[in-house]
Image (cartoon, rainbow, N blue to C red):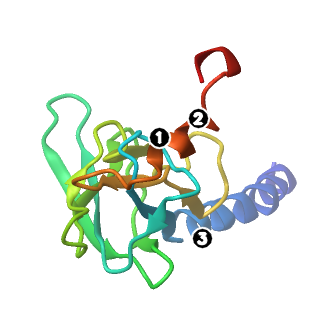
Amino acid sequence: MARLLLLFAVVLLPVVLVSAAIKGTPFHIRGHVYCDTCQCGFETSATYYISGATVRIVCKQRENMVTTYTMDGVTDSTGSFNIKVEDDKGDQICYTKLVSSPVADCKTPDLGRDRSQIILTRSNGAISNLHYSNALGFRKEKPLAGCTELLKKYLPYDEA
């Protein structure tokens, strides 16, 4: 009986220690923020990335949609953000969302590209600490002059 207990302890102890170490490791959420210069709802070759844009991570309880966590981050010179989240959020609904843009004529969040759902739990089998948000976009007040020609590249041949 003592040997069985010792064997059980030797097998179980490393699993418990590794699990505890992984649970305490923070997540890093990465993504980028762009300016939709043609007001088409997606990135094009005329798109540019916004330095100094503010992005927020929000987590809400699934049952009552009460906000339980928020954390802001700012994009770097390439329009990329990297936000550290300390705790596992379990079954909560979490997403990144646009907060503000420093670009005067590109401040309106692009509907459908203003937020992106993210997973902040290790209970789903994912082991990486690095998670990615879809690109988030603001929309220019007036489309650039060459957008009509540019968008022809993205349309099927029979619609161009």
Where is residue 73? Give x, y as percent.
32, 74
Query: Disc 3 to disc 2, how far (Cα)?
Result: 52 Å
**Label 1 packing within 10 angstroms: few (<14), some (14-19), many (20+):** few
Number of marks present in the image shown: 3
> Residue at image x 65%, y 42%?
125
Asked if the residue under mark 2 is in contact with the one under mark 1, i.e. CB atoms within 8 Å, the reply is yes
Secondary structure at numbered mark 1: helix
Secondary structure at numbered mark 2: helix
Query: Disc 1 to disc 3, how far (Cα)?
Result: 53 Å
Give the foreground label among 3 and 2: 2
Figure quadrant of the C terminus? top right
Query: Which residue is under mark 2?
Result: 152
Residue 52 badge: none
Q: Is residue 148 left or right of residue 13?
A: left
- Give the image quarter of residue 21: bottom right
Looking at the image, residue 100 lies above or below residue 12: below
Of the residues shown, which amino acid type is indicated by label 3? Ala
Query: Which residue is under mark 1?
Result: 148
Q: Nearer the viewer, residue 10 or 33?
A: 33
Secondary structure at numbered mark 3: helix
Where is residue 48? Give x, y as percent.
47, 66
Where is residue 120? Give x, y as percent.
45, 52
Residue 21 badge: 3
Query: Disc 1 to disc 2, how far (Cα)?
Result: 7 Å
Q: Is residue 36 left or right of residue 26?
A: left
Of the residues shown, which amino acid type is indicated by label 2? Lys
> Residue at image x 81%, y 56%?
11
Of the residues shown, which amino acid type is indicated by label 1? Thr
- Give the image quarter of residue 65: top left
